[in-house]
Amino acid sequence: QVQLVESGGGSVQAGGSLRLSCAASAYIYSRSCMGWFRRAPGKEREAVAGIYRDTGSAAYADSVKGRFTIFLDNAKRTLYLQMNSLKSEDTAMYYCTAGGCNGEIWDVLRSYVYTTWGQGTQVTVSS
């Protein structure tokens, strides 16, 4: 049973933009927080951005702050990641996730709070 479906990945030149989408089932969308993580070849998975569904409060990794924006469309039960000013180091598989956060803003960047993961969408940035 597919519960999180990512889309929007692709290839883009450095400086360009992409918008990732993550459609969630009703049950999964009811979780308190959602986020985006990424894994580059040969590297550990890292948090990119996360958001509380009820308040819209969000947190970002330092590497993407000011360039990426995470947001929700509650009517569509969809999570988005707007990525601008892309760099070659942003090349990775991006994963959408949902889980139960405890109210602290930095929880949204902690992988252990997340219990459901999508299959991932590839982003490739060429310099």
Image (spheres, helix red, strand yellow):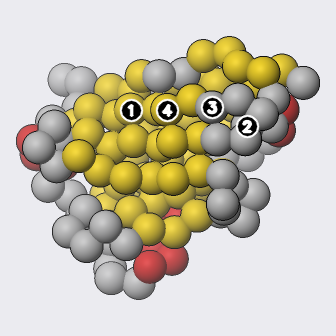
Tell me: residue 21, above or below residue 46.
above
> What is the C-alpha distance between the residues marked 3 and 2?
6 Å
Query: How many numbered markers are drawn?
Result: 4
Query: In the shown orientation, is residue 10 left or right of residue 27?
Result: right
* Sequence-first disc among 4 and 2: 4
Q: Quadrant of residue 40?
A: top right
Mark 4 against mark 1, which lies toward the viewer?
Answer: 4
Label 4 close to label 3 by CB (< 8 Å): yes
> What is the C-alpha distance between the residues marked 4 and 2?
11 Å
> What is the C-alpha distance between the residues marked 3 and 1?
13 Å
Residue 81 position, x and y percent, is: 47, 43
Residue 31 position, x and y percent, is: 21, 58
Q: Secondary structure at mark 2?
A: loop
> What is the C-alpha distance between the residues marked 4 and 1?
7 Å
Query: In the shown orientation, is residue 10 left or right of residue 87?
Result: left
Identify the disc placed on residue 17.
Answer: 3
Category of crowding for the residue at label 1, using alpha-carbon neighbours closer than 10 angstroms: few (below 14), some (14–19), many (at least 20): many
> What is the C-alpha distance between the residues marked 4 and 3?
7 Å
Q: Quadrant of residue 25?
A: top left
Q: Which residue is mark 1?
A: 21
Label 4 close to label 1 by CB (< 8 Å): yes
Say which of 3 and 14 sits in front.
14
* Sequence-first disc among 2 and 1: 1
Q: Quadrant of residue 21?
A: top left
* Sequence-first disc among 3 and 2: 3
Q: Which residue is mark 4?
A: 19
